[in-house]
Image: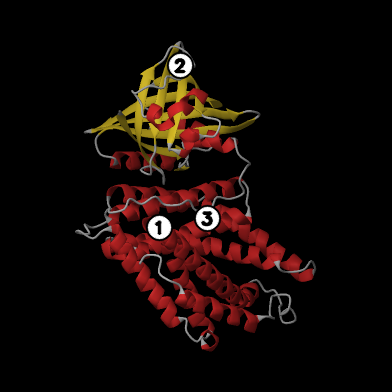
Amino acid sequence: MNREIELKLELPQEAVGAFEQSSLIPDGGDRAELSAIYFDTPDRQLRDQGYSLRIRRCGDKRVQTVKADHGESGGGLFARGEWEMPVADDRPVIDTRTPLAAALGDAAESIEPVFHVDVERQAWILEEQSDRVEMVLDKGCVRAGEREASICEIELELKAGDPSALFAMARRIDAVAPVRLGIAAKAERGYRLLDAAPVSFKAEPVDLEPGSDPGQAFKSIARACVRHYRLNEALLIDHYDPHALHQARVAIRRLRSAITLFKPMIEARRAVHFQDELRWLAQMMGEARDLDVLIAGVEPGDLHEQIEGVRERVHADVLEALGSRRARALMIDLVEWLALDVVRESGRLSVEAFAADRLQHFHRWVVKHGRHMAKLDDEHRHAVRKKAKKLRYASEFFEGLFSGTKKNRKRHASFIDALEALQDKLGALNDRVSWPDLLRRYSIDISKQSDALGGKGRKKLIAGAARAHADLADAKPFWG
């Protein structure tokens, strides 16, 4: 088995010329037409177990490749197990030379083609001191039935040396042609065509290994957040959708919460830098999200039209900011930080002990400061809401560590239900506080529009928040 360490970058079609004509391209290089068939069982057992299987044809030669991704990849940097062998035709060979025979058992007999990938590949070897990197430009498409999606990406694969060389080259590329962090392998793109086109992507469960070091847990959680964000950012850039914007913001909040959660073991200067940059990104999208939520509850009429005019301008501002070099560089910088220089040694503390301590801390804070909900002012209720969000995200990050028994799974479900109810009520209250100021900034007169903006029902929301807080206070810890 070989081990592949690769950084993937998405390149806009219109920027290919600038990249190919840049001084980054060395003389020589190879060019090839590649055609690949990807295989799986009818019920997608390979995908579900974290494997991909393809046979790629280049000229008269065929090579079968199995790749394994069991939680080590994602978030832009791919580190995967890889098994290759030449084959005679387009029929997969399933034997003990790869893990597939053991993974599939009798289901190996049902392997079938599921999608095709055809690309024109250009490849160059870049050498600098002890670093050796293969740079590949792939242009083509992936096809599944009658659906297809274009591929235009640069892959930087480390052949020798330090992984930092991949990120240095990524920045040099971005200086001549705008690139974004790639988080989807070709196999994932193909599988995506087999399902309905998504309008957004929700956060995926984080697979943490019990007994592992908390620092490694942070890396896994943060990479998952980067992936969550980039999946939705890609949808936004293609076509603005409120659901994708919401999930992109959730991803940023989850990542910021993770940095706060693991603050004791993260180098402070870098953590502050990334918190500042992520705050900028979240605030930039926050106003658009507020307007998306607001307009959904306003009846057609003059106020609706005024809000819609503002909303369109704010959406345009969001897309402009997402297209900036600052936004592109942030994701690449984050992945480099996670890959190379992120956490201090945590001694003998297990991730379970760390998680239980953090969950207990946040739970006690929310219970203590959320008492007497009806007597709190808006500022203090907002503080409880923000801390409850951190508790919610921490509960989701660490769920798998404490799901070994039916009792703990039931407790976790009840705990999340109470948190969701509290967040919903406090979020609705916060909207009613923030919407008037938001619209005044755009000179929209709301003096006669309090009902249209949800002016009624405040006491009912506060009562509901108080009940949800009581339920959370009474909830049995799932980490106990």
Is residue 290 positioned above or below 440 on the image?
A: above
| 314 left or right, relative to 153 | right
Is residue 269 positioned above or below 225 on the image?
A: below
Q: CA distance from mark 1 to mark 3?
A: 33 Å
Q: Residues within 10 Å of mark 3 (few under 14, many from 20)?
A: many
Tell me the SS state at disc 3: helix
Query: For mark 1, what is the residue?
Result: 405
Q: Position of residue 371 (x, y in %)?
A: 47, 84
| 300 left or right, relative to 170 | right
Q: Position of residue 97 (x, y in %)?
A: 33, 23
Give the number of marks: 3
| 171 left or right, relative to 268 | right
Q: Judge whether residue 332 can be spotted in this image.
A: yes
The single residue placed furthest to the bottom in the displayed view is 375
The single residue placed furthest to the right in the displayed view is 301
Residues 304 and 329: in front is 304
- Disc 2 or disc 1, which is closer to the eye? 1
- Kind of residue at disc 2: Cys
Tell me the SS state at disc 2: strand
Tell me the SS state at disc 1: loop
Q: CA distance from mark 2 to mark 3?
A: 39 Å
Residue drawn at x 28%, y 60% as measured from the top left: 266
Is residue 417 positioned above or below 140 on the image?
A: below
Q: Position of residue 381 (x, y in %)?
A: 51, 80
Query: For mark 2, what is the residue?
Result: 58
- Kind of residue at disc 1: Thr
Q: What mark, if any, has residue 248 been given in the picture?
A: 3
Residue drawn at x 38%, y 76% as measured from the top left: 364
- Kind of residue at disc 3: Ala
